[in-house]
Image (spheres, rainbow, N blue to C red):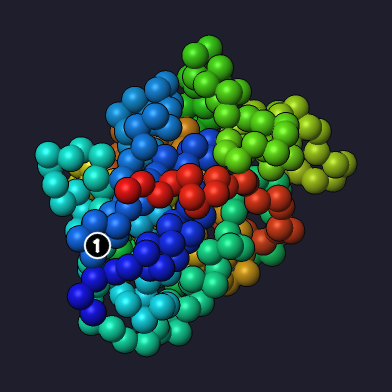
Amino acid sequence: MTGYDEGALLRAASAGVRAPSLHNTQPWQFRLRDGAIEILADPSRRLAVADRTGWAMRIALGAATYNARLALATAGTPAMVTLRPDRADPDLMARLTPARSRPPTYPEQALYDAIPRRHSHRAPFWPDPVPADTRRRIIDAARAENAWLDLLVGMVPLAGFAEIARSADRVLRRDTRYQSEMAGWTHADNAPDGVPVAAGAPAPEPQDLLPQRAFAERRRAPGRDYEPEPLVAVLGSAGDRPADQLQAGQALQHVLLTITDAGLAASMISQPIEVPAARDQLRRALGRAGHPQLALRIGYGHPGPASPRRPVTDVLVY
């Protein structure tokens, strides 16, 4: 195959827009150029307060890149991915060029089929433990994308992580500009982006171990406390350059789709990454030489409402 066409672009973008992004800002654009599909940042959608460095935007664009890869592979035209291929174009994050045509593998098809079912589950999980084979699968998913995933097993590491996360959350709650920005991306109507109030977590209570975003003041049902020993995973990368963060975003999406395919759900905990001092504390607590990029809470639960997405036509550029 000499190059991708408009049909491939539409398929890749339709999958790419289903990726997660901080506050569901959807900071991506897609274009077809010289037979390659390019994924670009939309700087107008970067969070000026919460994402001063562009870290969250690059994680989201990496996740969108992974979805686009799956879409192309399951159509029989897998892609070779080059991250940040043109340093003269700082908004160009990834270029996908056709590799040798082949049928999709069973894992590729299963992960692609999981894309529309994946969304953040911010409510309490059931008490059922995550099986050992699923734990191995999600660790392998991160490793396949040149990232690492540490599962926090036992109350000692979990309590240490919870204290770091709560401390970071307190810092962010005291930042009025941060809170105002988050409120601006919280919607009660049918907006095509941002976080719907109905998709937010119930209001936090004193007994909660982990912090939750205050998207709404909705109270939880009686007896629906959060799990006392949640399964928490920390995703990280060896480096912390923009390309490393894009690679971590691909790993994040591979992990999230693996979780979804296994019949589980996840919510993301980014507060310890958003506060530099907390991120460094988390790195030291893990005993890792690399860089934490995001934390996840994983478990079983009823599917909740999906966050909205803009029409694909809104993210195509020519």
Question: Label 1 is placed on what type of residue?
Answer: Ala
Q: Quadrant of residue 101?
A: bottom left
Residue found at the very far right of the displayed protein: 222
User: Which residue is located at x 45 percent, y 84 percent?
Assistant: 106
Q: Which residue is mark 1?
A: 36
Q: Position of residue 262 (x, y in %)?
A: 57, 72
Q: Quadrant of residue 118?
A: bottom right
Work out whether 160 lies above or below 127.
above
> Taking the image as drawn, is residue 61 in sight?
no
| Left or right of 215 in this view: 30 | left
> Taking the image as drawn, is residue 206 in sight?
yes
> Badge 1: few (under 14), some or many (20 or more) residues near its Cα, within 10 Å?
many
Q: Position of residue 290 (x, y in %)?
A: 24, 47
Looking at the picture, tell me which residue is in the foreground, 212 or 311.
311
User: Which residue is located at x 47 percent, y 61 percent?
Assistant: 15
Looking at the picture, tell me which residue is in the foreground, 72 or 160.
72
User: Which residue is located at x 85 percent, y 42 percent?
Assistant: 221
Looking at the picture, tell me which residue is in the foreground, 9 or 92.
9
Q: State the SS at label 1.
A: strand
User: Which residue is located at x 57 percent, y 39 percent?
Assistant: 193
Q: Position of residue 187 (x, y in %)?
A: 67, 31
